[in-house]
Image: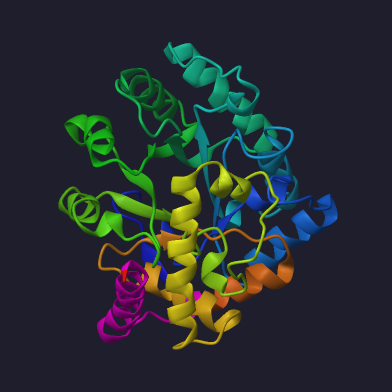
């Protein structure tokens, strides 16, 4: 596993981390014993960064709870990133983050579920927030008190990141980026480089599509990917992405080959991100971790970029 300095945070992280959204039953039910074994397998494979959120899981908070159980006795060997700001969203009763005390309350609840007395990276989970001042004040206070070590925001929007980075206050950003979604390359990543903001890449496998295991007749029934059928625009995007994956299959063997290539594509960007693919089994997380052993050359990245761009052009014809 390769490790790299993570911006200005002082953390030295594995290039491949583990996202724990998947172990909370939202992507299909996972037995608790399997969830805990998956986290332990990640540590054994060299992964030292785990990403989660207060809202992950059915019921909400389950991913944090399972991560905390799995890390019992080895907490000091790893780093945890979690997020607040979307508790109760799926039930329509979101906790209003209107005061510093609410930021403190939700952070302490995460600490409890994670069974730890500090969080390495705390992120605002409101990706379209207009005024982040409550989070900024709350996070600063929690940092002074030693409950969090550094903080930032999870967002795909550059204007939101700029609002959060007032007075260079943002140390970390989590953003969606993959071979199937390269929007961050245009302006988002250059901004992060200019302000030395560390980057966590979520969705590096584009919710599993970049494994190459799925075809046009696949029907996703989990609570996350079923949203791809919610309207015609979403279905069209899915069709376009599957077209790109078919082109990639002509270059790379589906399965481990494509997973490795997709993850290495993400971590080899000059912004030096840490990718956080999810996993539902020890076998999956071990496979993901292997991608962190090497970086991809610029020529290799360009070949993959050209393949996906060509497939889009063919789809338009």
Above-or-below relation of 99 to 306: above
Q: How many marks?
A: 0
Residue 11's spot in the image, x, y percent?
40, 54
Front residue of 130 and 72: 130
Residue 306 covered by magenta stretch: yes
Above-or-below relation of 219 to 295: above
Which SS type dominates the magenta stretch? helix
Q: Quadrant of the C terminus?
A: bottom left
The answer to whether 48 appears left or right of 244 in the picture is: right
Residue 89 location, quadrant: top right
Residue 311 covered by magenta stretch: yes
Front residue of 203 and 67: 203
Q: Which residue is most to the front?
A: 317
Residue 271's spot in the image, x, y percent?
27, 62
The answer to whether 135 appears left or right of 185 in the picture is: right
Q: Is residue 14 visible?
A: no
Above-or-below relation of 292 to 204: below
Residue 82's spot in the image, x, y percent?
53, 40
Above-or-below relation of 61 to 203: above
- Residue under the image location 55 percent in, 58 percent down: 207
Front residue of 263 and 314: 314
Residue range highlighted in magenta: 291-316
Q: Is residue 296 visible?
A: yes
The answer to whether 242 appears left or right of 166 in the picture is: right
Residue 272's spot in the image, x, y percent?
31, 64
- Residue under the image location 43 percent in, 80 percent down: 247
Residue 36 location, quadrant: bottom right
The image's colouring method is: rainbow
- Residue under the image location 39 percent in, 34 percent down: 127
Front residue of 256 and 173: 256
């Amino acid at each position: 596993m390769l490790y790299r300095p993570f911006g200005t945070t002082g953390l030295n992280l594995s290039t491949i981390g583990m996202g724990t959204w998947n172990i909370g039953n939202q992507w299909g039910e996972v037995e608790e014993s399997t969830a805990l074994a998956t986290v332990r397998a990640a540590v054994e494979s060299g992964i030292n960064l785990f990403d989660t959120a207060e809202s992950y899981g059915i019921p909400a908070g389950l991913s944090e709870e399972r991560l905390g159980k799995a890390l019992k006795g080895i907490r000091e060997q790893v780093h945890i990133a979690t997020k607040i700001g979307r508790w109760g969203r799926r039930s329509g009763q979101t906790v209003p983050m209107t005061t510093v005390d609410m930021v403190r309350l939700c952070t302490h609840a995460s600490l409890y579920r994670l069974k730890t007395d500090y969080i390495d990276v705390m992120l605002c989970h409101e990706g379209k927030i207009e005024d982040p001042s409550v989070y900024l004040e709350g996070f600063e206070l929690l940092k002074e008190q030693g409950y969090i070590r550094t903080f930032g925001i999870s967002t795909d929007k550059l204007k939101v990141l700029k609002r959060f980075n007032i007075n260079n206050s943002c140390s970390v950003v989590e953003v969606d980026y993959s071979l199937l979604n390269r929007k961050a390359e245009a302006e988002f990543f250059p901004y992060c480089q200019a302000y030395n903001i560390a980057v966590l890449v979520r969705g590096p496998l584009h919710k599993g599509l970049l494994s190459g295991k799925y075809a046009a007749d696949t029907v996703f029934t989990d609570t996350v990917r079923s949203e791809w059928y919610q309207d015609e625009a979403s279905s069209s995007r899915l069709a376009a992405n599957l077209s790109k994956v078919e082109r990639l299959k002509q270059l790379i063997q589906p399965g481990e080959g494509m997973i490795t290539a997709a993850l290495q594509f993400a971590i080899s960007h000059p912004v030096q991100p840490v990718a956080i693919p999810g996993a539902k089994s020890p076998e999956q997380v071990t496979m993901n971790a292997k991608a962190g052993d090497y970086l991809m050359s610029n020529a290799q990245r360009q070949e993959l970029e050209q393949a996906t761009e060509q497939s889009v052009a063919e789809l338009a014809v």
